Image (tube, coloured by chain):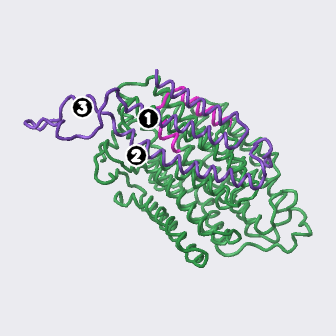
Chain colours: A purple, B green
């Protein structure tokens, strides 16, 4: 159920990117989409009452050398967190490029309204 | 050879970060270094022919670590990328002199090459996304490189649609991970085979089709291409139309549809429908254009349709359990057209760059009679036009012939007819280019036009030779079996890919 809320957030971002006329708002919409995807990834790995996926002395049965079953069943999945870190960095890069494009376009056209920035046709 | 796989990403990546250090004074040295890097990539790609295998990064075993996979399809794409990038880099040595900040341009160019090479070799789906973003971010910046009104507008449009596509793909990756618990393409495919498709995976597949379709500019996702490709500097248009839309779009789509999810009748029809729509819409919009590069850009959409049609037809026949030989032939036609298009379309964009540099305009109505003053540009352009229109014996003819034979053999007469019709309209629009640019009266203000010199001519001549000779790839059995057939095998074997990768590691 919570996952569908992520999808809702994704659609909000898509709506914003497609419908809005202001360039900055379009950029915000795209970023909402990316963060919805990031949130979804994080939620995939999360568990209620989970523990950090770091094995320390408490989790290992010292006699058998086995990892305790309670740890395996309660630790969160670390992989999505690594993915999200990567994708946040990529998002930062594309956000910086998009905003700098917005600034340059504003410098040339003097407006953020995409309905007025229409030199290319056909 | 497998040990050298990381070099495909490492060489352009390191070059990309070294190049800006040269600054303004070392422009010549930077250009030479960039050319050496692209040419060494061609050599590496040629050495890879016939090899297949898996490289484990950091010796981590397969589901845990990152792996690079070399197989027939990756090898074909690596060849196309390296040949086109070498020609475009040679061309930019002289062409880009009129822009400032040439070393930044070279650096972005190498980043784009690194992203594409990585994408083609990547064996897991998240790295595929990361490399896709590297290549796309570099291409957004390159489209806006001129920093004039049109360039910035096109770049913003391209970037918005490209970022939406990337968000779709990221969401799809997350859905796949949630449903299969793996990011490695071989293991995802194994999990899907054992548990079957569910709603989540079907949704992920549709996200991938939309995302990669946007990157490949298939109609109805094509709106950005006719703005973005003409606005970029000519060598970059050649790279974008020549290889970027293929690697980011069609290759990634084929990989996910055939090797990860497995073919199905519905997906086959979707890809065919996208292909046919692109062919028709692209070509009819192209005929009416009066801007040289814009006309070429619309043709990219239409020619990508051929590739999608071939691959989709193959998927449909395989999914229905029809005769494997027609499926193989259709996929062969699609992939062969992909490499052919890489060569002739980049050549066309380079000739358009040569014309624009010499005359300062690319409006067809202001040009004319250039055949006398620019004979070599004219000759190479004529070769490329004949190729794209499917005139024998140039390479475009052979791939279209294979596609038509496959469509007729499998009983899809309508698709064969569409292929021929689109080819005819393509011929008309390229006759228009020949007529308005190279024949007719030479306008008064263009009397002193000079032919391009040096490396630009070498790059164009090299690609023109390829256009003439590439038919041999199909006709000579030894060449076909070492380059094209392995790529077709990868796609027709479908989900056996996972077993091959797991065994090969």
The crowding category of the residue bearing disc 1, from other C-alpha atoms within 10 Å (few below 14, some 14 to 19, many at least 20), is many
What residue is at 21 percent from the left and 28 percent from the top?
A: A70
Mark identifier at residue A41: 1
Give SS at disc 1.
Answer: helix
| Separation of marks 2 and 3 at Cα, in angstroms | 28 Å
Discs 2, 3 touching: Cβ within 8 Å? no
**Image depth: mark 2 or mark 1 in front:** 1
Give SS at disc 3.
Answer: helix
Residue B459's place in the image compared with B404, above or below, is below
Is there any visible trace of residue B416 in the rendered image? no
* Closer to the camera in the image, B392 or B470: B470
Residue B377 falls in which quadrant of the image? bottom right
Mark identifier at residue B123: 2
Is there any visible trace of residue B422 in the rendered image? yes
Q: To which residue does mark 3 refer?
A: A72
| Separation of marks 2 and 1 at Cα, in angstroms | 20 Å
Residue A66 picture location, percent across and down:
14, 36
């Amino acid at each position: 159920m919570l996952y569908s809320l992520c999808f809702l957030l994704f659609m909000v971002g898509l709506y914003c990117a497609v419908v809005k006329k202001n360039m900055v708002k379009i950029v915000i919409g795209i970023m909402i989409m990316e963060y919805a995807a990031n949130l979804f990834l994080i939620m995939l790995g999360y568990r209620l009452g989970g523990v950090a996926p770091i094995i320390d002395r408490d989790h290992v049965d010292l006699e058998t050398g086995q990892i305790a079953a309670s740890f395996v069943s309660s630790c969160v999945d670390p992989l999505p967190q690594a993915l999200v870190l990567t994708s946040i960095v990529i998002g930062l890069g594309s956000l910086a490029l998009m905003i700098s494009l917005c600034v340059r376009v504003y410098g040339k056209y003097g407006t953020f309204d995409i309905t007025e920035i229409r030199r290319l046709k056909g | 050879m497998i040990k050298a796989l990381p070099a495909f990403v490492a060489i352009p990546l390191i070059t990309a970060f070294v190049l800006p250090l040269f600054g303004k004074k070392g422009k010549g040295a930077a250009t030479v270094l960039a050319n050496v890097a692209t040419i060494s990539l061609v050599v590496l790609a040629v050495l890879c022919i016939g090899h297949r295998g898996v490289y484990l990064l950091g010796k981590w075993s397969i589901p845990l670590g990152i792996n690079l996979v070399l197989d027939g399809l990756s090898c074909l794409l690596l060849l196309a990328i390296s040949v086109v990038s070498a020609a475009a880099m040679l061309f930019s040595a002289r062409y880009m002199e009129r822009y400032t900040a040439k070393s930044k341009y070279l650096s972005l160019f190498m980043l784009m090459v690194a992203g594409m090479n990585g994408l083609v070799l990547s064996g897991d789906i998240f790295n595929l996304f990361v490399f896709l973003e590297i290549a796309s971010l570099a291409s957004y910046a390159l489209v806006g490189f001129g920093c004039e009104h049109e360039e910035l507008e096109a770049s913003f449009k391209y970037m918005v649609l490209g970022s939406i596509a990337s968000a779709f793909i990221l969401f799809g990756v997350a859905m796949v991970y949630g449903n299969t618990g793996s990011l490695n393409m071989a293991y995802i495919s194994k999990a899907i085979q054992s548990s079957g498709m569910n709603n989540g995976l079907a949704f992920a597949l549709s996200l991938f089709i939309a995302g990669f379709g946007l990157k490949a500019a298939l109609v109805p996702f094509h709106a950005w291409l006719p703005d973005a490709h003409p606005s970029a500097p000519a060598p970059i248009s050649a790279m974008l139309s020549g290889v970027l839309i293929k690697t980011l779009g069609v290759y990634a789509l084929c990989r996910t549809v055939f090797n990860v999810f497995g073919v199905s009748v519905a997906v086959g029809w979707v890809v065919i429908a996208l292909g046919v729509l692109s062919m028709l819409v692209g070509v009819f919009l192209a005929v009416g254009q009066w801007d040289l590069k814009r006309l070429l850009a619309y043709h990219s959409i239409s020619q990508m349709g051929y590739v999608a049609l071939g691959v989709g037809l193959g998927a449909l026949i395989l999914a229905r359990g029809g005769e494997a030989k027609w499926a193989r032939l259709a996929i062969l036609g699609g992939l062969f057209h992909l490499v052919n298009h890489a060569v002739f379309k980049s050549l066309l964009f380079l000739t358009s760059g040569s014309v624009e540099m010499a005359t300062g305009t690319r409006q067809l109505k202001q040009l004319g009679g250039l055949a006398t003053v620019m004979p070599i540009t004219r000759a190479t352009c004529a070769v490329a036009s004949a190729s794209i229109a499917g005139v024998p014996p140039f390479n475009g003819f052979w791939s279209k012939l294979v596609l038509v034979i496959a469509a007729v053999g499998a009983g899809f007469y309508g698709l064969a007819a569409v292929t021929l019709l689109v080819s005819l309209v393509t011929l008309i629009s390229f006759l228009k280019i020949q007529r308005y640019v190279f024949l007719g009266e030479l306008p008064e203000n263009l009397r002193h036009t000079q032919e391009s010199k040096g490396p630009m001519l070498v790059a164009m001549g090299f690609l023109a030779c390829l256009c003439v000779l590439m038919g041999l790839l199909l006709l000579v059995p030894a060449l076909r079996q070492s380059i094209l057939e392995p790529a077709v095998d990868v796609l027709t074997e479908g989900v056996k890919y996972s077993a091959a990768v797991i065994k090969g590691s």
